[in-house]
Image (cartoon, rainbow, N blue to C red):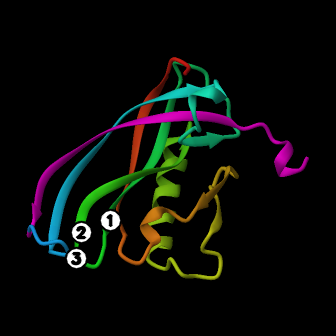
């Protein structure tokens, strides 16, 4: 079976984000700094393509009401004049296994310290169970942006969108 023949299922992951602190010099190109907080709220199945793209896809069709482990990253953003701590968050993968989620989270942490390796854009991770994840380089691999934390949280799949 070709990879394009494997059915994929989409999920919408909901976050709560809040700016906790912000400072700007007031000048057009002045210094600025922000601190943000991100919290994972929940996950729902995305079945209607007219409701937008999913935040994460999986080969597994997890039913509504099942528990999944969400591997997500929080990262700092910046430019030449300042930075925002924890300004962004991105979902890396979902799985039914807490052990696999922790393995994947550790793999991301280790790889992000070497973000300019030979296979930086699409990297495959094979868990000890044989489950394979293709993890694209996150937005934190930019010039000013940097990975802050890799999180694993369990949530119950909510109603479909």
Disc 1: which residue: 77
Name the residue located 64 percent from the left edge and 82 percent from the top edge.
118
Choose between 62 and 139: the one closer to the eye: 139
Q: Which mark is residue 83?
A: 2
In terms of secondary structure, where does tag 3 sit?
A: loop
Q: Is 53 inside the magenta-drawn segment? A: no
Q: Which residue is mark 3?
A: 81
Q: Which mark is residue 15?
A: none
**Magenta-tinted stretch:** 1-25
Q: Nearer the viewer, mark 2 or mark 3?
A: 3
Tell me the SS state at disc 1: strand
Seen in the image, is 123 located left or right of residue 38? right
> Which residue: 55% across, 65% down?
137
Cβ atoms at labels 2 and 1 below 8 Å apart = yes
Nearest the viewer among 112 and 21 is 21
Q: Earlier in the sequence, mark 2 or mark 1?
A: 1
Neighbours of disc 2 within 10 Å: few (<14), some (14-19), many (20+)? some
> Which quadrant of the view contains residue 96?
top right
Looking at the image, which residue sits at the far front?
A: 28
């Amino acid at each position: 079976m070709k990879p394009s023949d494997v059915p994929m299922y989409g999920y919408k992951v909901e976050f709560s984000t809040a700016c906790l602190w912000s400072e700007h010099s007031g000048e057009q190109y002045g210094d600025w700094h922000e601190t943000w907080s991100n919290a994972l709220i929940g996950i729902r199945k995305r079945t209607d393509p007219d409701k937008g793209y999913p935040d994460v896809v999986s080969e597994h069709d997890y039913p509504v009401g099942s528990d999944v482990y969400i591997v997500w990253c929080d990262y700092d953003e910046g430019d030449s004049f300042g930075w925002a701590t924890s300004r962004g968050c991105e979902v890396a993968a979902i799985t039914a296994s807490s052990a696999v989620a922790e393995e994947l989270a550790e793999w991301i942490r280790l790889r992000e310290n070497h973000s300019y390796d030979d296979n930086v854009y699409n990297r495959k991770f094979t868990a000890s169970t044989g489950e394979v994840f293709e993890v694209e380089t996150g937005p934190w691999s930019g010039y000013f942006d940097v990975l802050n934390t890799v999180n694993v949280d369990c949530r119950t799949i909510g109603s479909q969108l």
